[in-house]
Amino acid sequence: MTTPIPAEDERLFAYPQDRSCPWQPSPGYRELGEGGPLHRVGLWDGKSIWMVTGHAQARRLLADPRMSADRSRDDFPAVLPRLDAPIFKPIAIIGFDPPVHDIHRRLLAPDFSLKQVRALRGSVEELAGRLVDDILRKGPPAELIEDYALPIPSMVISELLGVPYDDHAFFEAMTVGLLQAKSARDAEAAGQALWDYLDKLITVKEREPGGEGVLSRLVGQVDEDGDLTREDLVRIALALLIGGHDTTSQMIALGVVTLLEHPDQLAALRADPGVLPAAVDELLRMVSVTDVSGVRVATEDIEIDGHVIRAGEGVLVSSSMTNRDPEAFPDPYRFDVRRAGGHNVASGRHHLTFGFGIHQCLGQNLARMELEVAFAVLFDRIPELRLAVPLDRLPTRSGGTMQGVHTLPVEW
Ligand code: HEM
């Protein structure tokens, strides 16, 4: 779908454009990327922005302290109409610059460490196993988003934060409402409902200290004159709840689709389970589920590769395209679970799906672990799994940056 650009420059490439294949970027982006690493593209509001498709340029810009992530700035670009909603300005951690960003990130880091994530793995394996038991008991066909891809990250983030999973239907619907809203008004309504819910939950935790989860731990650290105000805490809860489940659930779903559509790669993975970590990184690279590694605004003029990004101009780093820069990934459109070198995953992990620089995804250890468990358990327990509808009939998301499918019917 190509959106018409109203004002500034009729000839600009319109951003965003829909994919025609669930794991490949929009054909329009491919053409654009072939023309160089930086491009001016037009947005829904008639404004223009830099779109970065080169891997090296993206890393340079995302690591540059002259690039601000502060969404409360007037010149911060709203890449989609929903991102114009006041609830997104500012959103915790991801929408702050240092020093506040670093202070809040340090407060959360212990809950997302590799050690902490490893300790959770056994319970995620049990959870995935129970979900597959239910799927097999009910018999084919199954609805893989509702029955598997969503409950895994949703239960994990509930437990981690200390949000009651009994409320999952509410917070899942509001998150999708927020992330898929076509207007700032709809996004604001969904965001406000989540805000009110988390605000009440934090009040309960204040009254009953000593509970499990990140929120109970942080409630004790709230200090209105210090590093963490109560409003900061609600914002952090909102960012983690939103960031923690839709991304991962759609990555599980699109990962399953990609593997099923590449039977030779699925067979290679089955033949050697040691390939799993590399396969997960290759899936993260291919699918680039958020389609964006980061949006920023330049606070000073920045020269890069013969271009000048002027102070006040917006920059959007495309993950799907930087992940297909042939300088960084030879034969980049090919899906190869062994790309990262079998057991050595180091080389394949330089994709930009989790961003780069100080805002690089806080939940990436957790997401990688959930993905490894989700694929391993599903394909081990249901080896004959296949799509129940042809690929071109999958109801895919459109008009935004967050990729996904609304439903994923499977059979065996
Ligand atoms: C496949 C799943 C995921 C993907 C593709 C993803 C992607 C991203 C990306 C691209 C960024 C950087 C944005 C920027 O620089 O502007 C980011 C940041 C972040 N992510 Fe994730 N994410 C995933 C899962 C998670 C999970 C499970 C959590 C938490 C439970 C999480 C929490 C965060 C947070 C808090 C930040 C902000 C970090 C900061 O600003 O310092 N993400 N994520």
Image (cartoon, grey):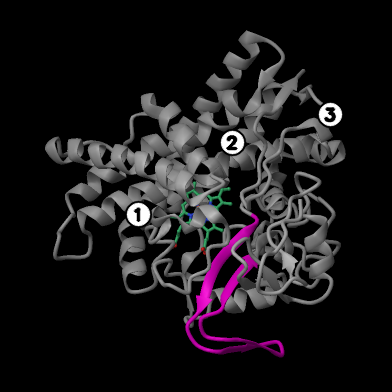
Which residues are the magenta region?
A: 291-317
Q: Looking at the rendered structure, which numbered label has been put on residue 373?
A: 2
Front residue of 412 and 119:
412
Seen at 61% across and 40% down, the residue is: 250
| Residue 58 in view of the camera | yes
Q: Looking at the rendered structure, which numbered label has been put on residue 110?
A: 1
Q: Is mark 3 within 8 Å of ligand 1?
A: no
The three-letter code of the residue at mark 3 reads: Pro
Check if mark 2's residue and mark 1's residue have beta carbons within 8 Å.
no
Query: Which quarter of the rendered picture does the C terminus lie within?
Result: top right
Q: Is residue 386 left or right of residue 248?
A: right
Please state the horizontal and vertical placement of residue 265, each as a whole percent of the image.
82, 42
Q: Is residue 158 above or below residue 274?
A: above
The three-letter code of the residue at mark 2 reads: Val
Per the picture, the main secondary structure of the magenta-coloured stretch is strand
Q: Is mark 1 within 8 Å of ligand 1?
A: no
Please state the horizontal and vertical placement of residue 344, each as a whole percent of the image.
69, 57
Front residue of 370 and 405:
405
Q: Quadrant of residue 109?
A: bottom left
Q: Residues within 10 Å of mark 2 (few under 14, many from 20)?
A: many
